Image (cartoon, rainbow, N blue to C red):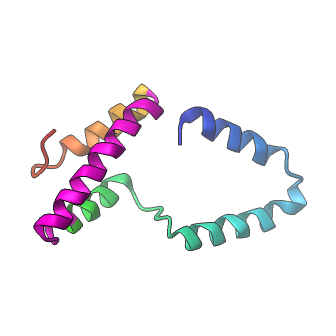
Amino acid sequence: MTTQQRRKVLAAIEQIPEEYLGELLQTIRSFQQHKKINVESPKQSWEDAIQQLENTGATQRQNRQNKIRELLSLWQDMDSPEEQQETLNIIETREDVSI
């Protein structure tokens, strides 16, 4: 999600009357569980992804690497330079990853 999209979401939330915020929060939590959105730190998410990559066969690894290339390409087009730099900083802290 881009910074602009985040601002739009936050602006929409600000328009919701206070008496409905509890229900909105419940809906968001339900959405997170349904989509299995992990709210852990980006560094932990990255470490989990690396561990999954290391524990797969050659064919699965190649398929995932292709998907990662696709994702990085999309990331380059969608995220702001600040978000890209933050993600790159996390990637660079990994000794077992090179870009």
- What residue is rendered at 61% in x and 40% in y? 6
Residue 66 within the magenta-colored segment of the rendering:
yes
Residue 8, position as x, y percentages in the image: 70, 38
Q: Which residues are magenta?
A: 53-80
Residue 42, position as x, y percentages in the image: 37, 53
For the residue pair 28 and 62, the one nearer the viewer reads as 62
As drawn, 54 above or below 11: below
- What residue is rendered at 10% in x and 52% in y? 96
- What residue is rendered at 16% in x and 38% in y? 99
Please indicate whether residue 59 sits to the left or right of residue 17 in the image.
left
Please indicate whether residue 38 sits to the left or right of residue 66 in the image.
right
Q: How many marks?
A: 0
For the residue pair 42 and 35, the one nearer the viewer reads as 35
- What residue is rendered at 85% in x and 51% in y? 16
The answer to which image quadrant residue 49 occupies is bottom left
The answer to which image quadrant residue 30 occupies is bottom right
Residue 37 within the magenta-colored segment of the rendering:
no
The answer to which image quadrant residue 41 occupies is bottom left
Please indicate whether residue 89 sits to the left or right of residue 76 in the image.
left
Residue 80, position as x, y percentages in the image: 46, 29
